[in-house]
Amino acid sequence: MTQQQFETILVTGGAGFIGSNFISYFLARNKNIRVVNLDLLTYAGDLNNLEEVESNCRYIFVQGDICNRKLIEELFVSRFLGKNTKALKPLLNRLKSYVSPL
Ligand SMILES: NC(=O)c1ccc[n+]([C@@H]2O[C@H](COP(=O)([O-])OP(=O)(O)OC[C@H]3O[C@@H](n4cnc5c(N)ncnc54)[C@H](O)[C@@H]3O)[C@@H](O)[C@H]2O)c1
């Protein structure tokens, strides 16, 4: 199966306690699903929680705020969720500009 055939789900707060466990569990049990994790990385977020999936080609991390309308629109309007991982690189770089220091 090519990456383009993956269905993609968006998980918010995926670096937290519930989200990180959900992502690991979900990726292991759903081989045709790709997960985009949108997390602001507040005090509660820790990417170490996701070590076991960080090299998984079906896992993508985006740092950002779910309250940031422009970021969310960019994720959806650009069809982020439908693109393959390689094609996402320029977009992922652009999304970094939405992250402002807490
Ligand atoms: N060891 C344990 O048993 C343990 C540890 C931690 C938490 N808990 C429990 O788990 C529950 C909380 O877990 P959770 O996963 O819901 O919360 P969490 O606080 O663990 O994680 C929330 C995540 O959301 C992210 N986040 C916050 N605001 C955001 C925003 N505006 N945009 C994007 N991301 C944002 C944070 O960076 C974090 O990664 C509580 O009941 C808590 O008591 C248990």
Image (cartoon, helix red, strand yellow):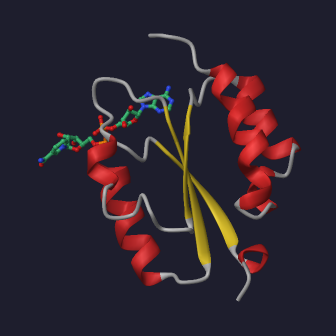
| The one of 60 and 18 positioned closer to us in this rendering | 60
Residue at x 71%, y 75% (from the top left corner): 3
Residue at x 74%, y 30% (from the top left corner): 94
Whether residue 4 is situated above or below residue 79 in the rendered picture: below
Q: Quadrant of residue 13?
A: top left
Is 17 on the left or on the right of 93, as rendered?
left
Is 68 on the left or on the right of 59, as rendered?
right
Whether residue 70 is situated above or below residue 82 in the rendered picture: above
x and y, in percent, of residue 9 in the image: 62, 61
Find the residue positioned furthest to the bottom.
1
Is 54 on the left or on the right of 32, as rendered?
left
Total of numbered circles in the picture?
0
Is 99 on the left or on the right of 1, as rendered?
left
Residue at x 80%, y 35% (from the top left corner): 74
Residue at x 56%, y 26% (from the top left corner): 65
Quadrant of the drawing holding the C terminus: top left
Whether residue 55 is situated above or below residue 101 in the rendered picture: below
Quadrant of the drawing holding the N terminus: bottom right
Q: Quadrant of ligand 1?
A: top left
